[in-house]
Amino acid sequence: MLQVDTPRGAAHVHLHRADEPRAGLVLGHGAGGGVTSRDLVAVTDAALSEGVTVAFVEQPYRVAGRRSPAPAHHLDDVWLAVVEELVADELRGLPLIVGGRSLGARVACRTANATGAVAVLCLAFPLQPPRRTTGSAPVSRLPELELVRVPMLVVQGERDPFGIPPAAARRRVIRVPGDHSLRTDVQAVAEAVRTWLPGIVRRQR
């Protein structure tokens, strides 16, 4: 594990090195979860099998033991600082893929252009919070997805209460059994990523 000092506190990076890396994949965790969620672990195994080194970024609020996430701009500041350090050292010279699950996917999308990523991987992107019985409809987060200008894979549970993002020219959306947790069939999640990654890596070569 690496510790990276950022403008918003210390972040931890859990690095899983491929034997002969062809690319690097940097992943962020969900709002209240950590880097050991079953879908992230399954994706790590899939990426390693394709020669992709994986780096999990643990945000400072989770390092400090808090479950409530920091403000969005704090999360983005941390992510950019960590990715900059990884690209300068452990992932130097490798094509960069960024992503994460839920909240981590949102951070990766918002900052994809700034990091110079060649692709984005979103697991359980929280498109729109479930509507409450009172009040106005929640605001869609589709604009965050549309900020991304590079190829993107979204893996979404077919019963996700946060909805399912639409496919687009650069955005492939794969539905798998289950809900927002993506726990029902983690092998389906891994297979979706394993099928997508080689094309991304080949394009960079």
Image (spheres, grey):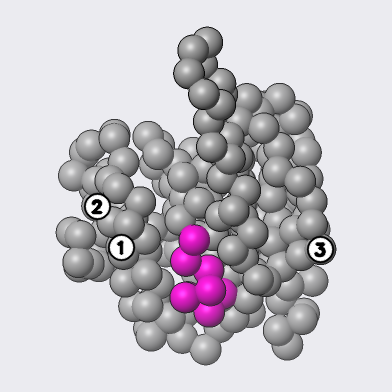
In this orientation, does residue 20 appear? no
Left or right: where 11 falls relative to 83:
left
Residue type pointed to by label 3? Ala
**Most common SS among magenta residues:** helix
Residue type pointed to by label 1? Val
* Residue closest to the far front: 136
Residue position for label 1: 78
Left or right: where 149 falls relative to 133:
right
Q: Which of the 4 quarters of the picture holds residue 90?
A: bottom left
Q: Please provide percent x and percent y for residue 154.
A: 69, 50
Quadrant of the drawing holding the C terminus: bottom right
Q: Which residues are magenta?
A: 110-117
Q: Please provide percent x and percent y for residue 109.
A: 54, 60
In this rendering, the answer to whether 98 lies above or below 159 is: below
Q: Please provide percent x and percent y for residue 162.
A: 60, 31
Mark 3 near mark 2, Cβ–Cβ under 8 Å?
no
Q: Secondary structure at mark 2?
A: helix
- In space, the residues marked 3 and 2 are separated at their CA atoms by 35 Å
For the point 77% across and 79% down, the residue is 202
For the point 67% across and 71% down, the residue is 150
Q: Which mark is residue 169?
A: 3
Residue type pointed to by label 2? Pro
- The disc, 3 or 2, on the residue closer to the chain's N-terminal end is 2
Q: Which of the 4 quarters of the picture holds residue 161?
A: top right
